[in-house]
Image (cartoon, rainbow, N blue to C red):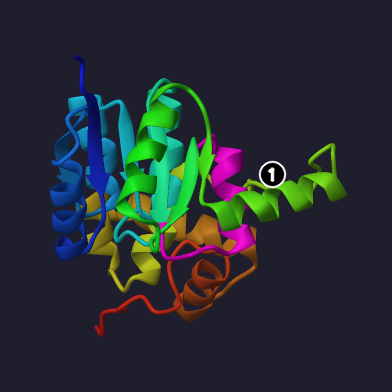
C-alpha cells in the first residue's frame, strides 16, 4: 500500500512533535519532513515533493499564506491543508483563493486531521465543520462567490510581500538581504516600492499594514533593534 507522504510546516516544535506522533500511528500516512518557517516549507516541498503539506498560517520569515501561494504556483499537484489557530473569515477567504485544499482549526481531533489528509490527497476539499457551515452560509448569500474569494493586495509582488514580512518582524536591510539572497540595494529598492505603493512613510507604518493584512500576527514577537 502506497502511503500518503506529508510535510509538516509549523513553527512550534512541540506542536510539530505532537502532530508527527499522532500521524505515525496511521498505517497509510508517512511524515517525510518538517519545516519551522514558511521559507523552509517552500524549499522542502520542492525537494521532497510530499503529497500533502500541513501548513500553519503564523510562520516566521514567510507566512503560511505566501508559502502556500509559492508552493502551489511551483507544484500545483501538491495539496496544502491549513491547520491554524485562526478561523477568521479573512484568512479562510484568502486561503481558498490561493487554492488550498482544506482548512482545519487546531482544536481539530486527530481522527479529523487524518481523514482530512486522506480526503485532500484524493483531490477533494476538507474544512472543519464550523468553517464549512460558515462557507455554506456565505455561498447561499452570494452564489457567484463575489467577495468570498478575495486575494491579498495584488499591488504587491511576491518578493515585496517577503520583504514586508521580514521588515515587520524587525530585520534590518542587511539581515533581510541575507535571508532572501539578494543585495542590500535591492532590499532598499523593495522598501521604497512598498512605501510608494502603500503610501506609507516609515517602518512602523509597514508593520501596522503587515499586521492588518494578516502577513504577520499582531502577537508576533518583534525583535528590539
- Does the stretch in magenta take in 86? yes
* Picture residue at 84% right of the left edge, 39% below the top: 143
Please indicate whether residue 9 sits to the left or right of residue 219 in the image.
left
Place of residue 130 in the rendered image (x, y in percent of width and height, measured from the top left): 59, 58
Q: Name the outermost residue toward the bottom.
A: 224
Nearer to the camera, 47 or 26: 26
Nearer to the camera, 75 or 196: 75
Q: In terms of image quadrants, where is residue 5?
A: top left
**Residue 128, above or below 101:** below
Q: Is residue 146 visible?
A: yes
Q: In terms of image quadrants, where is residue 71?
A: top left
Place of residue 96 in the rendered image (x, y in percent of width and height, measured from the top left): 58, 42
Place of residue 62 in the rendered image (x, y in percent of width and height, measured from the top left): 34, 53
| Residue segment shown in magenta | 84-100
* Picture residue at 77% right of the left edge, 51% below the top: 138
- Secondary structure under tag 1 reads loop
**Residue 121, above or below 40:** above
- Does the stretch in magenta take in 155? no
Name the residue carrying label 1: 149
Q: Quadrant of the N terminus?
A: top left
Nearer to the camera, 51 or 202: 51
Place of residue 170 in the rendered image (x, y in percent of width and height, measured from the top left): 31, 74
Q: Is residue 181 visible?
A: no
* Picture residue at 32% right of the left edge, 32% below the top: 52
Few, some or many C-alpha atoms within 10 Å of disc 1 (few <14, some 14-19, many ≥20)?
some
**Residue 26, above or below 83:** above
* Picture residue at 56% right of the left edge, 52% below the top: 129
Amino acid at each position: 500500500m502506497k502511503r500518503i507522504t506529508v510535510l509538516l510546516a509549523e513553527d512550534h516544535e512541540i506542536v510539530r512533535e505532537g502532530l508527527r506522533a499522532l500521524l505515525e500511528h496511521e498505517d497509510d500516512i508517512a511524515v517525510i519532513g518538517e519545516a519551522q518557517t514558511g521559507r523552509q516549507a517552500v524549499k522542502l516541498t520542492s525537494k521532497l515533493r510530499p503529497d500533502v503539506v500541513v501548513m500553519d498560517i503564523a510562520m516566521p520569515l514567510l507566512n503560511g499564506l505566501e508559502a502556500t501561494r509559492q508552493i502551489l504556483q511551483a507544484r500545483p499537484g501538491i495539496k496544502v491543508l491549513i491547520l491554524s489557530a485562526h478561523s477568521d473569515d479573512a484568512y479562510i477567504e484568502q486561503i481558498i483563493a490561493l487554492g488550498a485544499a482544506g482548512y482545519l482549526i487546531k482544536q481539530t481531533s486527530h481522527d479529523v486531521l487524518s481523514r482530512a489528509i486522506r480526503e485532500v490527497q484524493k483531490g477533494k476539499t476538507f474544512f472543519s465543520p464550523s468553517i464549512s457551515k460558515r462557507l455554506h452560509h456565505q455561498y447561499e448569500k452570494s452564489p457567484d462567490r463575489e467577495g468570498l474569494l478575495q486575494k491579498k493586495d495584488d499591488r504587491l509582488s511576491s518578493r515585496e510581500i517577503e520583504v514586508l514580512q521580514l521588515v515587520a518582524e524587525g530585520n534590518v536591510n542587511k539581515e533581510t538581504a541575507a535571508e532572501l539572497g539578494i543585495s542590500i540595494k535591492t532590499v532598499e529598492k523593495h522598501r521604497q516600492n512598498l512605501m510608494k505603493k502603500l503610501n506609507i512613510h516609515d517602518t512602523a507604518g509597514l508593520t501596522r499594514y503587515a499586521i492588518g493584512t494578516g502577513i504577520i500576527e499582531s502577537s508576533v514577537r518583534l525583535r528590539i533593534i
